[in-house]
Image: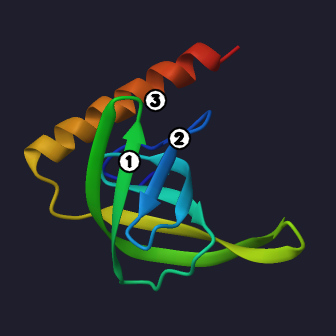
Amino acid sequence: MERRQFKRFSVQGNVEGNIILKADIEIIDISLNGMLFLITKRLNTNSRCRVNLNIGDARVGLDGSVIRSNLRESRQIQSDFQPVYEVAVNFVRLSDKRKSDLQKIIDYLKKCSDSTDY
């Protein structure tokens, strides 16, 4: 049984984002309440982070609280291996404007995802 307040959906395609520590993230899923992403930097549970989403002309900065951070795999980059962490974040202090901007991004991603379903 799903316990989330807002339904999450899988993200298809290339969606970029970053965190204040300037690490690139790979978004797995997103909702108005939070997101799940991959990152090569370790984030501590209960720490705060800021995620800046840039999708087309849409941009929104979101403050979040890390609720889970687990080592998922290691990836080879050139001759070195880097850890990849799966991080779950709940968004905090979302203003109506940011919530509206995030909803526009989610709607856009849904539309893109629907057009790639076969």
Report how far apart the C-alphas of labels 3 and 1 lie in the structure.
12 Å
Q: Secondary structure at mark 3?
A: helix
Across and down, in percent, residue 44 comes to 46, 86
Q: Is residue 107 found left or right of 61 in the rendered image? A: right
Across and down, in percent, residue 70 comes to 61, 77
Report how far apart the C-alphas of labels 2 and 1 lie in the structure.
8 Å
Q: Secondary structure at mark 1?
A: strand
Q: Earlier in the sequence, mark 3 or mark 2?
A: 2
Q: Secondary structure at mark 2?
A: loop
* Residue in view at x 75 percent, y 75 percent: 82
Q: Earlier in the sequence, mark 3 or mark 1?
A: 1
Amino acid type shown at disc 3: Leu
Q: Within 10 Å of the Cα at label 3, are there few (<14), some (14-19), or many (20+) other Cα atoms?
A: many
On the question of residue 10 being in view, the answer is: yes
Disc 3 or disc 1, which is closer to the eye? 1
Q: Earlier in the sequence, mark 2 or mark 1?
A: 2
Residue at the extreme left: 96
Asked whether the residues under the numbered discs 3 and 2 touch, taking CB atoms below 8 Å apart as contact, a structural biologist would say yes
Asked whether the residues under the numbered discs 3 and 1 touch, taking CB atoms below 8 Å apart as contact, a structural biologist would say no
Q: Say which residue label 3 marks.
A: 109
Residue at the extreme right: 79
* Residue in view at x 36 percent, y 84 percent: 46
Colour scheme of this structure image? rainbow
Amino acid type shown at disc 2: Val
Q: Is residue 74 above or below residue 95?
A: below
Q: Is residue 57 above or below residue 33?
A: above
Q: Residue 15 has which mark?
A: 2
Amino acid type shown at disc 1: Leu
Q: Within 10 Å of the Cα at label 2, are there few (<14), some (14-19), or many (20+) other Cα atoms?
A: some
Asked whether the residues under the numbered discs 2 and 1 touch, taking CB atoms below 8 Å apart as contact, a structural biologist would say yes
Q: Say which residue label 1 marks.
A: 53
